[in-house]
Structures are given as C-alpha cells and as structure tokens.
Image (cartoon, grey):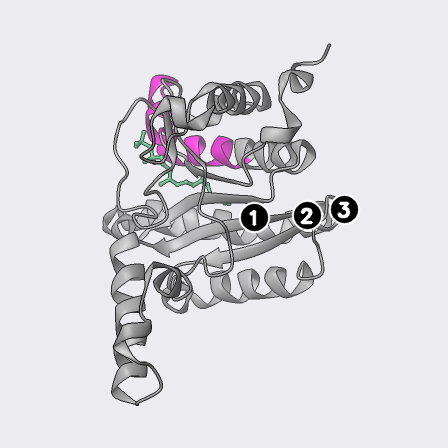
Amino acid sequence: MSKQEHIDNSKLPKHIAVIMDGNGRWAKQKGMPRIFGHKNGVKAVKEITEAAAKIGIEYLTLYAFSTENWNRPAIEVDALMRLLVETIKKEINDLNKNGIRLNAIGDISKLPPRSKTALEEAIEETKANSKMVLNLALNYSAKWEIVNAVQKIATSVQNGDLNVSNIDADYFSQQLETAGMPDPELLIRTSGEKRISNYLLWQLAYTELLFLDIYWPDFKESHLIDCIIEYQNRERRFGKTSEQLT
Ligand code: FPP
C-alpha cells in the first residue's frame, strides 16, 4: 500500500495554505549563503505543488513573499525576485501538463516590472487549467488585504451601491484576495516557528494549524501526506460538542 493510499479521499481538505519557513536556517546549517536555501526551497515548492495536485487538493496557497520581506537585505530581495521570474518561466510547461492554474494574491503592482510581467504571463498561460489552483502570496499581508477590502466596501457604500445592512461575513470574504475560494482547512508552517505572521488572518478563523520542526527545503511529498492524515484525524467541531457531531 503506498503512503498516499492512507489518505481518506472522502475527507480531503479542499484548500491547504503553507508558510514555507526556514530556507535561511537550512542554508546556514550547511555553511551556505541564504539564497542557496531559497533555491532549494524552490525544489520543495515544485515537489509539493505537483504532489498536492496529484492527491486532489483544489487550492494550494504558498506564502512566497510578505510585505515585510522588503525589509531584508537588498541582495536577498533581488535574488528572491530573480528566482521567482526564473522559476515561473521554467515551470509553465509543467504547470500546464499537471493542470495547475497559477494565481497571485497580494499587491503585485509593487513587484519589480520583470517579476510582475512574468507572473501575469504565467497566470494568462495557465488560466484554462482546472485540476488545482496554485496561489502564490506575493507582496502579501493579511492586514493589507483586510484594509483593502474595507476600502472597497466603504467606497461602495459612499457611492450608494451598497447598503450597510448587506455587509456580512460572506460579503466581506468576497472582497478579499481569495474571493471565490473556500477557506483553507489546513495550514502548515515549517521551521518550528509557531506564528501566523500576517497570513490569511480572516480565512484561517477555523483552520487546523500544523507546525512542523523541519525546514522548508526538507519538506517532501511524504510530509505533505502525513499532514493530510493528521488533519483527517482531528475533530473539527466549529463550536459544537463532540456528541453533536456523531
Ligand atoms: C522563508 O524562509 C522563505 C521565504 C521568505 C521565501 C520563500 C521563497 C521560496 C521558497 C522561493 C521562491 C518561491 C517561489 C514560489 C518561486 P526564511 O528565509 O525566512 O528562512 P529563515 O527563517 O530560516 O531565515
């Protein structure tokens, strides 16, 4: 029996969100520069993306660059942006082969023009794919996303297009970057840190959180399968009692 066969396909999470943490520490441990960690992080991105699509996950959201990451040394920011362009260009064929549609969440208007163009082209070239959506969170932060949503709603009210009484949680969700997508049922963070780090704050309200003590470049398909199995063994009560669920 393969490891994947231990997954209960009737209880698959539709949406998995990931905080890919620990590239820098992984490299440091090996006496290598941080960018070596990011390059190996890209290999893990490819393996996990293709594994998630194969397993039948519908949405995979990866935290690739936060609004706070601009504060890193310029050399690292430049290297990350270059890596993004190279990876996207190199991977378009495989994304299409695996039926994966690329999407970005975050303020991509502020990315360097080459990164923005490469991203937009890849989004366009993969738009017909329907097996899985790969959301890259780029120049993303949840507080930015929420403030942005509030501004959109306030503008609609101000223009007379929206009644205050029609603003509810569902309406609010539809103003976020993840409009039209289910909230993640599972969040995985690597590297041992136990924080949410300004990621999907609204969408994670009822998400199962898994914190792993390994660095992102070491995160393999088998770890993803273990995470899904652990998620399937959790009791999700949504405020009810155990007895009410049975
Ligand atoms: C966290 O490790 C990782 C990042 C901030 C960047 C994630 C980027 C990649 C995996 C590569 C590019 C991605 C794509 C989609 C092409 P860290 O640098 O914070 O590690 P540390 O906490 O050990 O310093």
Residue 198 lies left or right of residue 85; in this view the side is left
Where residue 190 sits, quadrant-wise, is top left
Q: Which residue lies furthest to the bottom in this view?
A: 159
| Above or below for 39 versus 89 | above
Which residue is the site of mark 2?
Answer: 95
Which residue is the site of mark 3?
Answer: 97
Query: On residue 134, which mark appears?
Result: 1
On whether ligand 1 comes within 8 Å of the CB at mark 2, the answer is no
Residue 98 lies left or right of residue 136; in this view the side is right
Check residue 179 for magenta coloring. no
Q: Look at the numbered discs 2 and 3 and tell me whether their residues touch, using CB distance below 8 Å.
A: yes
On whether ligand 1 comes within 8 Å of the CB at mark 1, the answer is no
What are the residue bounds of the magenta stretch? 22-42
> Which of the two marks, 3 or 1, is nearer to us in this view?
1
Residue drawn at point x = 25 percent, y = 56 percent = 143
Closer-to-camera residue (162/70): 162
Magenta part, dominant SS? helix
Residue drawn at point x = 44 percent, y = 47 percent = 183
Residue drawn at point x = 39 percent, y = 22 percent = 243
Closer-to-camera residue (165/170): 165
Name the element at disc 2.
helix
Name the element at disc 1.
strand
Q: Distance between the residues labelled 2 and 3?
A: 6 Å
Please state which amino acid type lies under the numbered disc 1: Leu
User: Residue 170's spot in the image, x, y percent?
Assistant: 39, 60
Residue drawn at point x = 52 percent, y = 18 percent = 226
